[in-house]
Amino acid sequence: MRTTNILEINDSFLGWTDREKDPKQKSRKEKYLCNYTRADKIRMQRRDFVLHAMIDGYFPTAEEKPNRPGEYDYLLVSRENHTYYIVSKTEYDFAHYIEFYQFYIEENLEHCLKYEKREKLIAKREKEEAEREAREAEEKANQEKLDWQRWFMTELKTYGDVEKIELLKKVFGDLYTARSEELLVSIENFDNKYCKQIVIDMCGNTDNKLSRKLFYHLTGLKIPTGNKKSREFLQSISSADFVGFVPYIEKETNKDKVKESEEQQYYIYDTQMGCFRPQMGKPYKNKYDMECFIHRGISGNWCISEVTTGCRIALAKTKKECEQKFKDTCEMNGAEKMHVAIEKTLERTGISPLIEQREREAKERMVC
């Protein structure tokens, strides 16, 4: 027997275990063949023992046990002097594989080992490349999330839509927390994947009724019942699917209610979007020679806004408080200053679409 542990040195099974489809069986066979044994007082792994026995002229054979049909002794038998080694079924199968591909011939063995070495080198390079790409992707993702966290913290600190914050406080009441503000900002930036995930985590659970309620009032979309359906729905939509704001109306006395039959369409200036948007309201008469209307904000608060610019002059929880604030503001500044402020605001916002419509209708009447 030769002493060189050639398979151990090259960590090779000559491709025999690669044919095994079951990973557990493959691991079991490799582990067994890596166990050490002694042959002719030489210590080597079982895989090298089988290979060198084949090189030395041994061949595998199986002999049925006497009086025990169906049971076999597995042997490696010498072609020269008929000496033999008793081996296991795994060693016997490995020996048959070596015999079939004639790896006991030195040239074939060297060719197989070189091929395996080349394949392992290629696999190693591919693994290193894949690991490098995975590290780069992870670093990029971590940096992207870090940048988003910084941006998100800035958004939380600078967010200034008073009406939506009031809506948030009314919806959550005593349960209002910093986490509630995160949800508000996340809904406002719904198309950002990290913000969207916050909304899914908070609104995708049917137990979070207040979060789902806030989502409805800000977007006009009702989330389906059931956690799975809720998450699938939120995952499938974008901000383009939002219908619009739904005012949050608390229970109030009949005196404070505005009859829908007396309402008409005006326009308010949305400072966040930088444009006008329609708003139902009721004409509000005053002694300061300003055309105003009174309406509900998206948070359910009462507002008095100026028609020409669409800008809010007073905001309060009740209609009575709102009217008082409007009066106080006008008394403090005076009618003249209020009109100057309106003219300056027009330079920034432009004229309300309602005024433009009135002017077009007036011209059409003159032509007629």
Image (tube, rainbow, N blue to C red):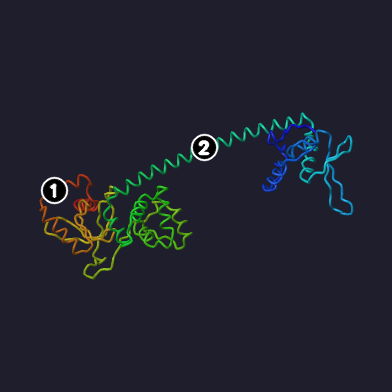
The spot of residue 138 in percent (x, y) is: 48, 41
Q: Is residue 286 left or right of residue 26?
A: left
Q: Name the element at disc 1.
A: helix
Mark 1 closeness class: few <14, some 14–19, many ≥20 residues within 10 Å: few
Q: Is residue 129 left or right of residue 176?
A: right
Residue at the (34%, 47%) spot, across then down: 153
Type of residue at label 2? Glu
Type of residue at label 1? Val
Image position of 12 with respect to 88: above or below: above
The spot of residue 361 in percent (x, y) is: 22, 53
Q: Earlier in the sequence, mark 2 or mark 1?
A: 2
Q: Quadrant of residue 213?
A: bottom left
The spot of residue 266 in percent (x, y) is: 24, 56
Q: Name the element at disc 2.
A: helix
- Which mark is in front, 2 or 1? 2
Q: Nearer the viewer, residue 124 or 163?
A: 124
- Contact flag, marks 2 and 1 (Cβ < 8 Å): no
Residue at the (25%, 60%) spot, across then down: 301
Q: Nearer the viewer, residue 339 or 14?
A: 14
Q: Nearer the viewer, residue 20 or 323?
A: 20
Q: Is residue 65 left or right of residue 24?
A: right
Q: Nearer the viewer, residue 221 or 101?
A: 101
Provide the residue designation for mark 2: 133
Q: Residue furthest top?
A: 107
Provide the residue designation for mark 1: 340
Picture quarter with the N terminus: top right
